[in-house]
Image (tube, rainbow, N blue to C red):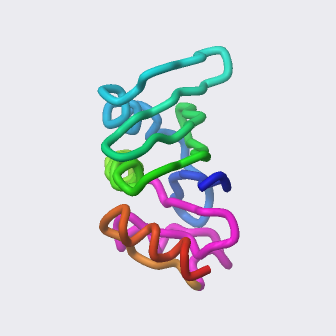
């Protein structure tokens, strides 16, 4: 899928820095190409791949193909304590405790996900 998916941490109804290193540790074994100047990495995992733009405080993923990369992205988001926000879809929590920290309006329809399959179901239903 070629639309954008954003990843961000929240505390006290606002963005909170951090998480990038935890995500990088999850993705690192699967990075096949990088352009550090643009914070870009191509990740290949299982039956597909994803383009990610990873910073210290958040990430954007696009051009995700297959199903396995979605699991990897959710694993990384959970490790980073990030909420997954596919454009045009409800926010996807990787831990129920994140709900209390979401900015007002983003928390209304937020759903808890446990896997890439859960994330894909949210995306496909929107």
Q: Quadrant of residue 67?
A: bottom left
Q: In the rendered image of this protein, does residue 25 appear above or below residue 106?
A: above
Which picture quadrant has residue 88?
bottom right
Picture coordinates of residue 86, whole percent (x, y): 60, 63
Residue nearer the viewer, 49 or 36: 49
State the residue at coordinates (35%, 46%): 47
How many numbered marks are there? 0
Q: Where is residue 89 in the image (x, y as percent from the top left)?
A: 62, 73
**Considering only vertical position in the picture, is 11 above or below 106?**
above
**Residue at 40% in and 48% down:** 69
Residue at (31%, 68%) from the top-left corner?
114
Q: What stretch is highlighted in magenta?
A: 82-108
State whether residue 10 is above or below residue 28: below
Q: Is residue 41 above or below residue 82?
A: above
Residue 35 is left or right of residue 42, and the answer is right
Q: Does the magenta-highlighted stretch encompass residue 43?
A: no
Quarter in which the N terminus is drawn: bottom right
Q: Is residue 89 found inside the magenta-colored segment of the image?
A: yes
**Residue 84, image x and y in percent?**
51, 60
Taking depth in this image into account, of 35 and 124 the one nearest to the observer is 124
Q: Which residue is drawn at 56% across and 37% down?
A: 51
Is residue 81 left or right of 56 when viewed as pictured?
A: left
In the rendered image, residue 64, in percent from the top left (x then y), is placed at 53, 49
Q: As rendered, which of 14 and 89 lies closer to the eye?
A: 89
Q: In which quarter of the image is the C terminus?
A: bottom right
Q: Which of 60 and 69 is in front in this view?
A: 69
Residue 123 found in image quarter: bottom right
């Amino acid at each position: 899928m070629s639309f954008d998916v954003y990843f961000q941490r929240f505390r006290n109804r606002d963005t909170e820095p951090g998480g990038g290193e935890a995500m990088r540790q999850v993705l690192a074994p699967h990075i096949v190409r990088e352009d550090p100047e643009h914070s870009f990495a191509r990740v290949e995992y299982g039956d597909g791949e994803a383009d990610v733009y990873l910073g210290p405080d958040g990430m954007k993923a696009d051009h995700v193909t297959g199903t396995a990369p979605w699991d990897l992205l959710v694993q990384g988001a959970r490790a980073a304590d990030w909420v997954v926000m596919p454009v045009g879809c409800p926010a996807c929590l990787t831990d129920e405790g994140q709900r209390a920290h979401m900015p007002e309006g983003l928390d209304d329809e937020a759903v808890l996900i446990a896997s890439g399959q859960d994330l894909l179901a949210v995306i496909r239903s929107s």
